[in-house]
Image (cartoon, helix red, strand yellow):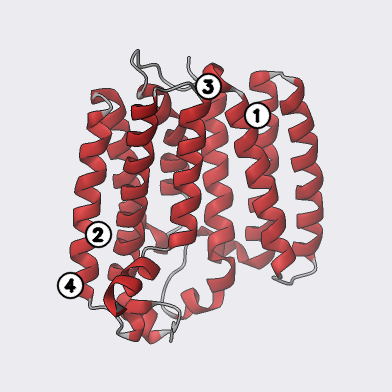
Amino acid sequence: MRVPIALVLSSHPVPAAAVTAVAFTLAIATGLEPWRVGVVTLAFAANQLSIGWSNDWIDADRDRASGRRDKPVARGDVGIPTVRAAAVVAAVVAVLLGFLLGPAAGLVHLVFVASAWAYNAGLKSTILSVLPYVVSFGLLPAVVTLAAPEPRFATWWALLAGALLGVAAHFTNVLPDLDDDSKTGVRGLPHRLGLRGAGISAFGALALGAVVVAVGTGGPFAVVGCVLVLLVAVAGCALVLRGRISRRLFVLVLVAALVLVAMLAAGGASLAV
C-alpha cells in the first residue's frame, strides 16, 4: 500500500479537494443536470490530480535539494516515472471528460489545465507566476456555465472574482515555502514581494473579489458576505504586518475564500451571461 498512499499524498490532496469542491458547488448552484454535475466534478478532480502530480514530478530534484520531507517523491516513497505517468493519464482523462460536456466547455477546460501545467513547468519561477492562477481560476466559472445544455459564458464579475480567488490562492500557497523556494531558484512574484507584500496581496485580492461579486449580483447575501470578507481581510492584513505566519492567518484566508465561493454560488443562474 506504500505506493498508492504516496501517490495520493503527491497529488496535493487538500488544495485538489478544495478546487474540486468549488467546481461541484458552482455546478449545483447554476442548476446543471445531475449527470453534468457529476462530469464537471470528475473533470476537475482529474485535472487537480494531474496538476498535483506534475508539480511533484517536475519539482522532485528541487524538493530533494531543499530537504522537503513532506514530499513523497523527494523521500523516495514513489518513483518519478510513476508520478509522471499518473500525471499524464489524469490530464488525458480530465481533458476527455471536459469535452464530454461540449466543445466550448471542453476547450475552456483544456486552457484551464494547460495554464496550470505551464505554472509547474516553469512560470512559477518567474515574475509571471500569478498568471496561470489568474487564467485557470478565472475560467473555472466559465467551464461550469458552458457545461449547460445551452452553453453560455460566465459573466464578467464571475470571471474576475474567480481570477482574484486565484491570486489569493497563489500568494497564500507559497507563504510557508518562501525561504525554501528562494534557496532553490524559485523567484515567483510572491517571493519578490516578500512576506508582507504577498500576504497583503492575498487578502486584498479576496476583499476585491467580494466587492466585485457584491456589485455584480447586488443581492443582500452578497452585500453581507462582502462586509464579512472585508472584516476578515483587515484582520488578516494586521497579522501579516506583524510579520508572522501562523495558523490563524491561514484560517482567515480559508474563511474569506469560503465566503467568496458562497457568494458566487448564491449568484446561481446569474453567473452566466
Q: Are marks 4 and 2 in contact (CB under 8 Å)?
A: no
Task: Give the structural element (helix, strand or loop) at label 3.
Answer: helix
Label 2 or label 1, whichever lies nearer to me, is 2
Label 4 or label 1, whichever lies nearer to me, is 4
Residue that numbered label 3 is attached to: 271
Badge 4 amino acid:
Pro
Badge 1 amino acid:
Val
Horizontally, is 51 left or right of 87 in the view? Answer: right
Q: Residue at 52% across / 21% down in the picture?
A: 271
Task: Give the structural element (helix, strand or loop) at label 1.
Answer: helix
Q: Residue at 63% across / 46% down in the picture?
A: 257
Residue that numbered label 2 is attached to: 87
Work out whether residue 258 can be spotted: yes
Looking at this view, is 55 or 251 the one in front?
251
Label 3 or label 1, whichever lies nearer to me, is 3
Q: Position of residue 47 (x, y in %)?
A: 32, 48
